[in-house]
Image (spheres, rainbow, N blue to C red):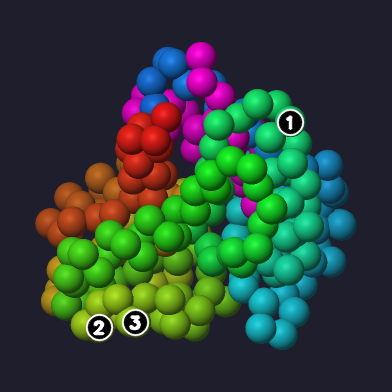
Amino acid sequence: MKKIGAITVGQAPRTDLIPEMEPILGESIEIIQMGGLDGLTKEEIAAFHPLPGDNVLVSRLTDGTSVTFGESHVLPRLQNCIHELEAKGVSLILFLCTGEFPDDFESNVPLIFPNQLLYGLVPAIGSRFLTVLTPAKEQMEQGMRKWSPHAGQVHMIAVSPYDGPGEVLKAAGTIPAETDLILLDCIGYTVEMKEMIQTLTGKPVILPRTLTARMICELV
């Protein structure tokens, strides 16, 4: 059985996420999970305020709640996760986050960043009007910076996948009619949410968790 590592910026295991990826990856792949916030209390995480220029991250804790924090606080902890997963014999490591990360992580195995996959796919589709769902209002400005170079026009909507399908569907009701492509810019959005939005809008919807799983199948 092949081993791959999976790092969430929140806490592992991601029982909300991995079960939707496993059927795509198949039974011959073992997923070993770690998290950048593993072992921390909510009080400790609450101190991770975004610093000036920091990317804002939103992720899930093991109790099912979500947290918002600055990326800079978790980067050293993510590096430790990489080293520990390498020691466990994984052949590659997937980041369970669509955020932007620095390119200076040390690793002896390939690191797969969903955001980089999306950077290749979205321009290839050639969207004239891209609507992007992102978990938090604090992420909307950075979302515009990320996606404006890759589409004719970008419209941002803030709604957390961790608030549940009902809230996501409500937010999807505000998607502009001229939208020709919808991107769910967080690994936390689910297959159910994608299908609801497709049914509501009749537009193509990109879901990072399943997209990434299918890409990994080409590599292992």
Mark 1 falls on what kind of element? helix
Say which residue appears at 73% left-offset and 51% top-offset: 79
Relative to 156, residue 5 above or below: above
- Name the spot of residue 42 as percent of width and height, x first: 81, 53
Q: Position of residue 171 (x, y in %)?
A: 36, 65
Q: Nearer the viewer, residue 129 or 169?
A: 129
**Amino acid type assigned to the residue bearing label 1 in the image:** Ala
Element carrying mark 2? strand
- Which of the 4 quarters of the picture holds residue 120? bottom left
Taking 104 as reference, is 213 above or below it? above
The C terminus sits in image quarter = top left
The residues colored magenta run 1-24
Q: Mark 3 = which residue?
A: 148
Q: Give the residue at mark 1.
A: 87
Q: Earlier in the sequence, mark 2 or mark 1?
A: 1
- Describe residue 172's horizontal placement relative to residue 81 as left or right: left
Residue 178 image point, x, y percent: 14, 76
Question: In the figure, is residue 118 to the left or right of 187?
Answer: left
Measure how far apart labels 3 and 1 are at the Cα level: 39 Å
Mark carried by residue 210? none
Q: Which residue is mark 2?
A: 153
In the rendered structure, which disc, 3 or 2, sits on the residue that comes first in sequence?
A: 3
Q: Alpha-carbon neighbours of circle 1 within 10 Å: few (<14), some, or many (≥20)?
A: few
